[in-house]
Each structure stands twice: as C-alpha cells, then as structure tokens.
Image: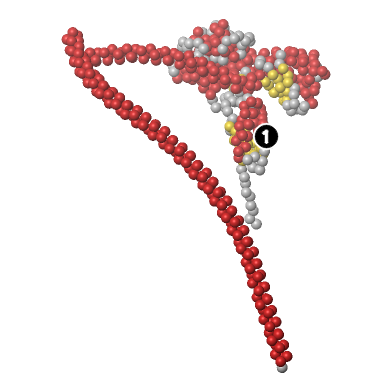
Amino acid sequence: MTEVYWAMGAFAAGALLAWFGAAFWGKYRYQVLLKEVEKEAEVMKKNKMLEVKEKYLHLKSELEKQTSARNTKIQSVEAKLKQRELIFNQRQEELQRKTAEVDANKENLNIQLQLIEKRKQDTEKLHQQEVAYLETISGLSADEARERLTESLKDEAKTNAASYINEIMEEAKMTANKEAKKIVIKSIQRVAAETAIENSVTVFHLDSDEIKGRVIGREGRNIRALEAATGIEFIVDDTPEAIILSGFDPVRREVARLALHQLVQDGRIHPARIEEVVGKVRKQVEEEIVETGKRTVIDLGIHGLHPELTRMIGKMKYRSSYGQNLLQHARETANLCAVMASELGLNPKKARRAGLLHDIGKVPDDEPELPHAVLGMKLCEKYKEKPDISNAVGAHHDEVEMQTLLAPIVQVCDAISGARPGARREIVEAYIKRLNDLEQLAMTYPGVVKTYAIQAGRELRVIVGADKIDDKHTENLSMEIAKKIQDEMTYPGQVKITVIRETRAVSYAK
C-alpha cells in the first residue's frame, strides 16, 4: 500500500516538475520572442520615420517651387499693373492738356465767328449800297438786270449747243459710214464663198462615171484641150456622175457646157474635134445672145436701142444674182417701172427703158474698176441714151445724184423685184450639201447618236446617248461643235447648236 502511495507521490512529483519545466520554458521563449518583436518594431519605426522624412522633404521642395512660381507671377502682374497705371496717368495728363486746348480753341472760334458775322453784315451793307448805286447808274432794277443777263446767257448757250450738236452729227455720220462699210465687208467675207460658187460654177451631169475617163483623155490631153478652147476650168473629181465647170464668165461656161454636151452625145472626144465643136457652139451662143436681146426689146416695146446694148441685154440671160436670173430681173423691173410711172403720170416708155437697162453694167465685155451702176450709166452715155435714162441707171444704187423722177422709180422697182419671195435663193445642191456637212460634222463626236439640221440650216439638233455622255459634258459638246462649225464651214447668219440628252424608261403591261 505504501509503495502504491509512494509511486503515486513520485508520479505526482514528476508531473509537477514537468509542469514547472514547461512553464519556465514557455516564459523563456516568450521573452525571446518579445525581444525579437521589439527589435522588428524598432526597425519598422525607423524605416517609417525615414519615409515620412523623405515625403516631408519632397513636399517641402514642391511647395517651395510653387511658392516661388506664384511669387514670380505676382511680381509680373505687379509690374504690368504699374506700367498700365503709368500709361493711364500719361493719357489722363494728355487728355487734360487736349481738353484745355479745345477750350482755348473754342474761345478763339467763338471770337472768330463773331468777327465773321460782323464782316458779313458789313459786306451785306456794302452789297446793298453797290446794288443801289448800280441801279441808279444803269436805270435798271436788280430783277431786270438779272433777266437780261439770263436771256443773254440762254442765247449764248443755244448757239454753243447748236454748234456742238452739228459737230457731233458730222462726227457721227463719219463714224456711221466707217462702221457701215466694216459691216458690209464682214458680210461679204461671210457669204463670199457661196456667192462665188453660185456665180462661177456650172455642174454638168453625166449618165455614168465611165465617161469621165474619156473626157480626161490619154494623159489628160482632152481636158487640157477643152480648157484651152473654152477658157473654163474642168474639175473631174469624186463627185458621182458630174463634172464641174468653173469660171467667172457665164457665157464661156455656157459655151463649155453645150460643147461638152455635144461631145458626150457624139462620143468622139479628141483635141481636133473639141476645137471644132467649141467654135461652132460659140457662134451659136453669140447668135442666141443677139436673138434673146432682140426678142426682149420687142416684147417690152422698146425702140431705137443701140445694137450693142441689145447684145448686152441678151448676155443677161447667162448671168444670175443670188439665184435670180438677171434678164428675168431686168424684165420684171422694166414692167414695174412702167406701171409705177403710169400711176404717177410720167412717161411709161422711158421708165420701162430705164428699168431694162439699169443692170446693164453687170455684163460688160471688159472689166473696168467701176460699180455696175456707174458703168451702166457710162455705157448708156456711150451709146447715145438720153440723159434722164442714163441718170436713172447710174443713180439706182445712190452712186450718183438723182436728177429726175425716173431715178427713184428705178431704184424702188429694182428693190421690189429683188425682194420678191422666191426671187433669190441658194443653189439647191450647195444648200443640201451644207445641211449634210452640218450633220456629218456633228456625227464625228463620240456619244452622238443622231443629228438633224433644221430651220434651213440655222439650227442643228444633236441627240446623244444618255449612257455615254452626262449632263455636264453636253454643254462642252455644244461649244465644241459650234467652234468646229465656225472654223471649218462657211454659212450665212448664225447656226444654233442644241444638244439633247434624254433618259427613257419603257415598260410593257402584259
């Protein structure tokens, strides 16, 4: 039992001893850990103090910089304010000085105004005294003197105005004559080509183009013989079934046409035969000219006309003016003159004679440098026509002064015959060719679908494809076509070019 108690006591003592050992060891470790924690806390405290110090120094330097910048800015603003204050003070002083000057000038101005008013009053008194003195001397009142002066000035102004108007009128007449001549020359330049074609070309039609080779002959000997015998140029080109006879003498062209017609009909074309035929045809044409002149004179009841004038009247058959046959024009003018002279109580026979001869200067045998009216008057005087007839022929275009009543009658009837609708026209072939040339010229541009020359060639309608040309390009196309027509073609008046572009939408209801 005692051993049991002993064992229990030993166990209890060991357990107590073990508890005390563990407690002592735990306390020791606690103290060691506490010392380590204190050391780490001290290190952390030092580190934190260093960081705080660094941040403090950094913030301090930033604040010093900001403070320095603000101080600099404040100093700059203070300097500007001081400068503005100085300028303001200077301007205020200048304003005060100018105000004082203005006040002084105002006082001086008032004094001067008073002096001027006083002098004005003195001047008015002197003027009244002078007017009264002048009225006493002249015996006229001021109103009467003013009226007389006004009337004299009016007369002088009217005289000067009349002189000035006369000078202007004379200058205007001179200028008008110059401008009129310029306009006429420009018009001649524009239509000269067509007039030359009309007056110098005859077209000889052939049955086939095979005859052209025979007309030309071997190495061109036949055509050279024709040109030498007739004095007319034969143009054999690509014109289908036609030969062009070119020359300014209408009688020679007629001789060449008739000779060529006989040669083609006969079939024998060689130089010897050509000379023979041309000689025969020339005699026939001369006989026909004389016969035509005699027949015309007899038809119109004109007697005692010189044979040479009769022959010239026959030559009118082969001359035309703007498509109007000259002989037919002379006959019309003669008949119109007779009717008008009868209505006015004048001699109709003289009027008919003057009307027939008025264009005789267009068919002379030679070519003097005179207007046809003056040349006709010279021919009438040469062949013993009466002075009133000669004057009427020479004055129908105002080249010479009208001396009798026959002259204005011939002038008016000449204008009536020429202005008759249908009397003068273009050559049909030239007209058709010009229309075709207009249409073909426009077709050369890309995008053009169709062209139509309308209004006798005065307007060209150009239809373009909507998918090929836009609206903006149509205007440029119109200008290009107009410029090309102006540069390459000859035409009277002006040609309007209208470019049409349209978009069509087509649908079908089924």
Which residue is at a point 75% across and 26% down the rendered structure image? 238
Comparing 220 with 96, the one in front is: 96
Give the vertical position of 351 relative to 506 (above or below): above
Which residue is at a point 30% across and 13% down the rendered structure image? 153
Q: Residue furthest bottom?
A: 1
Q: Residue furthest front?
A: 2
Comparing 301 with 159, the one in front is: 159
Which residue is at a point 63% across and 68% down the rendered structure image? 31
Image quarter (top left, top right, bottom left or bottom right) of the C terminus: bottom right
Comparing 175 with 431, the one in front is: 175
Which residue is at a point 27% across and 26% down the rendered structure image? 103
74 relative to 189 in the view: left or right:
left
Residue 141 in view of the camera: no
Comparing 215 with 102, the one in front is: 102
Image quadrant where residue 323 sits? top right
Looking at the rendered structure, the kind of residue marked 1 is: Tyr
Dot 1 corresponds to which residue?
445
Give the vertical position of 220 relative to 72 (above or below): above
In the rendered image, residue 303, in percent from the top left (x then y), is placed at 55, 12
Q: Residue furthest right?
A: 218
Image quadrant where residue 470 sits? top right
Q: How is the image coloured?
A: secondary structure
Bin the neighbour count of mark 1 within 10 Å (Cα to Cα): few under 14, some 14-19, many 20 and up. Answer: few
Image quarter (top left, top right, bottom left or bottom right) of the N terminus: bottom right
In the rendered image, residue 461, in percent from the top left (x then y), is placed at 61, 36
In the rendered image, residue 157, in percent from the top left (x then y), is placed at 33, 14
Residue 387 in view of the camera: yes
Give the vertical position of 154 relative to 381 (above or below): below
In the rendered image, residue 199, in percent from the top left (x then y), is placed at 64, 19
Callout 1: helix, strand or loop? loop
